[in-house]
Image (cartoon, helix red, strand yellow):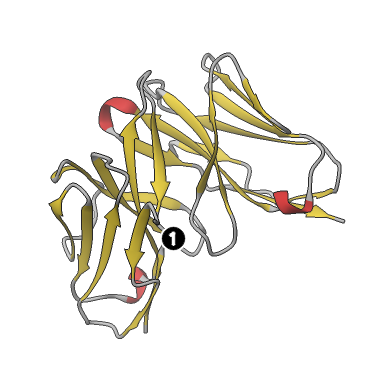
Amino acid sequence: RKEVEQDPGPFNVPEGATVAFNCTYSNSASQSFFWYRQDCRKEPKLLMSVYSSGNEDGRFTAQLNRASQYISLLIRDSKLSDSATYLCVVNVYNFNKFYFGSGTKLNVKP
Amino acid sequence: DTAVSQTPKYLVTQMGNDKSIKCEQNLGHDTMYWYKQDSKKFLKIMFSYNNKELIINETVPNRFSPKSPDKAHLNLHINSLELGDSAVYFCASSQEMGRGEEKLFFGSGTQLSVL
């Protein structure tokens, strides 16, 4: 079983749409959680951390449900520039391990 | 002023050759990593070093040998390259940010193609 599971997509949405991604993780010892964005042929870049209380950064909202071991990312008012692969990442702190999901591909169309 | 830099960006070589990838970070981070991203885009950790000490070795063939001369550098040497080694290799570093949270910062990747 993979440490982190995500729907690979692709999600094809029109500009202005709201889109949500979910991911689940298997290790209950996971301590910190992130969404990374990876553009084609580029390195992953941190989009936002995810906290139990939920957090928002502009059009992006992240939620964590520890009891169910899932993480979500909501993107409102999608832009063409949001087209990328979104990677769900969990960190098992005591072991310095970051586990990546396989990524969810988002295509925002005009 | 690149935070995590790795060279070369592209590496094309024949099966059986030995090659190295270099990585340096100027963020002052204590921990550095090598990740492999295969053709299915799945990112998998290979090694992790903390202050020059190996702390994670994820069942990587011993043809892969990381070396950390100091905490700002983590190089990866690969012996007897095989076709299956073709992938993008990312170097990364992290630092504990407080509240038990660490964040990863990646280099721009090395595209290795073994012919």
Observer-nearest residue: B111 or B25?
A: B25
At x 39% / y 56%, what residue is drawn? Answer: B1
Q: How far across and down, in percent of the image, does residue A22 sit?
A: 64, 33
List x then y, in percent, for residue A108.
79, 52
In the picture provided, is A10 more to the left or to the right than B68?
right
Residue placed at 36% from the left, 27% from the top?
B97
* Residue, disc 1: B108
Chain where mark 1 sits: B
Name above or below for residue B43 compared with residue B109.
Answer: above
Question: Is residue A36 rendered to the left or right of residue B72?
Answer: right
> Dot 1 lies on which element?
loop
Position of the N terminus of chain A by quadrant: top left
- In the image, residue B25 sits, relative to residue B18, either above or below, namely above
At 35% from the left and 59% from the top, the residue drawn is B5
Q: Is residue B73 above or below residue A28?
A: below
The image shows residue B90, relative to residue B96, as above or below, that is below
Residue B100 place in picture, x, y as percent: 35, 21
**Residue B77 % position (x, y):** 20, 67
